[in-house]
Amino acid sequence: MAAPAMRGDLPPGQRVVIRAFGETPLDALEHHAALEDMAAPDPAALAPDEILLAIKSCGVAWVDLLMTSGQYQHMAAPPYCPGMEYSGVVVAAGAAVDPAQVKAGDAVFSDFILAGPRAGGRYQSSGGFASYAVLPAGAVRRVPAGFSFDEACNLLGNYETAWHCLIARGQLRAGETVLITGASGASGMAAVQVARLLGATVIATGRSDAKLAVVKAHGADHVINTGNEDGSPGVRRFRDEVKALTGGRGVDVVFDAVGGDTSLECLRCAAFGARFLIVGWTSTPFVARGRGQRGAPNANQLPTNLIQMKGLSVLGSPAVISVAQDPSIRPPRVAQIMQWVAEGRIRPHISHRYPLAEFKQAMLARWNGEVIGGCVLHP
Ligand SMILES: NC(=O)c1ccc[n+]([C@@H]2O[C@H](COP(=O)([O-])OP(=O)(O)OC[C@H]3O[C@@H](n4cnc5c(N)ncnc54)[C@H](OP(=O)(O)O)[C@@H]3O)[C@@H](O)[C@H]2O)c1
């Protein structure tokens, strides 16, 4: 094994710290988020199974935003460093780390369920909005051949969500038609690619023609802008277009990442007996109270009359919570994703890149729906 670098060789870095939960993510960004100096971790202090990573890229996800106000189901107690998924170069490895698994100089990406704010336990503090992270060697994988650092840190969370929703829960099959809302988002773009790989026809929705053009270039068969033609807020009626695209039948599966009025219109687009996959609700993010106070005073509601008359299966589809309930479901989905990567069949799209110092701009771009697929920070 290469001799570990000494602390004195490593320049100091910086990291973002959320000092307290905000009332909303915007409040957290304005009042409780700061860029702080960070001493380089000491390689000599690594536990035998740990590695020290110099972070090159970190994804900026919707969930990273929701966590800053404690409005996501999983909380990291402030002060904490955000950044669920990141990639970089191994600087040093602990004495018990097998060099065949990972060694200094390797390009790796983190597993967000095992380290970082979406994880539990000791390594929850190892967020990716930072120059360095210390995490167990078992919480990283090698960056796939031909993948950039930016692509590697936009892989697992998004494609595991698509896999869990469309395959494990939705049982999507070749020849079926799936309606994907929020298709320009990180999960949506992954879902479009996975659905096409399965042989399904994809109808993708969004609020921007420019973003939908990129979604189409990534495989969507049809795109529908759900915004009102006069530019006023809200969701227009689009069931007629979906019915026309499906011979009057409606879609077999709905992958709904947007919620609210979009969900209601999607129920009208579903065929009798369709599967309606609850992915998320970006249009109604304030279900829980801010400042980590939990509860669900603004819980989403779906109309039981439509669900009943159409014989729909409404399926909650939480990709990570389901693993906590049954860890055996994860290895096959990760293996399938890594196989698709090796075969060149999936590749995350990244539209926005920022230096770490511009973390607020990056988070605002995500919050304001400017991003197509991935948004990353470069520490
Ligand atoms: N089920 C799971 O396991 C799982 C895993 C990860 C994430 N999620 C959830 O899934 C949802 C999507 O996550 P993501 O990472 O894909 O988010 P994202 O990258 O931010 O994308 C979501 C998309 O939703 C649309 N959108 C945003 N705000 C909206 C609004 N106010 N009204 C209508 N559309 C809006 C945007 O598309 P347009 O601008 O094109 O309309 C955006 O591209 C979130 O609620 C997240 O918490 C669930």
Image (cartoon, helix red, strand yellow):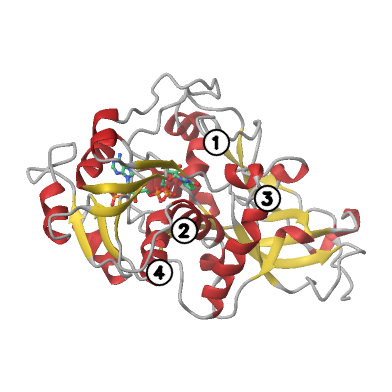
CA distance separating discs 4 and 2: 9 Å
Amino acid under label 1? Ala
- Compared across the picture, whether 147 is left or right of 7 comes to left
Distance (Cα) linking label 1 and label 2: 37 Å
Using the rendered image of the protein, determine whether residue 247 is visible from the camera's viewpoint.
yes
Instruction: Give the x, y percent position of residue 312.
Output: 32, 42
**Residue 293 drawn above or below residue 158:** above
Write the residue at 87% across / 68% down: 4
Q: Amino acid at mark 2?
A: Ile
Q: Position of residue 279 (x, y in %)?
A: 42, 45
At mark 2, the secondary structure is helix
Please report whichever mark, 4 or 2, sits nearer to the chain's N-terminal start. 2
Give the residue type that dot 3 points to.
Pro
Of pointers 1 and 4, the one earlier in the residue sequence: 1
Q: Are marks 1 and 4 in contact (CB under 8 Å)?
A: no
- The residue carrying mark 3 is 327
The picture places residue 182, in percent across and down from the top left corner, at 32, 50
- The amino acid at mark 4 is Leu
Q: Are marks 3 and 1 in contact (CB under 8 Å)?
A: no
- Looking at the rendered image, the disc whose residue lies closer to the viewer, 3 or 1, is 3
Looking at the image, which is closer to me, 249 or 105?
249
Q: In the rendered image, which residue does mark 1 sit on?
A: 33
Badge 4: residue crowd in 10 Å (few <14, some 14–19, many ≥20): some
Asked if 259 appears above or below 327 in the picture, the reply is: above
Direction from residue 239 to residue 297 in the image, left or right: right
Q: Residue furthest left?
A: 230
Residue identified by numbered label 4: 198
Label 2 belongs to which residue?
167
Question: For residue 335, which quarter of the picture?
Answer: bottom right
Task: Give the secondary structure at mark 3.
Answer: helix
Mark 3 in CB contact with mark 2 (< 8 angstroms):
no
Q: Residues within 10 Å of mark 1 (few under 14, many from 20)?
A: many
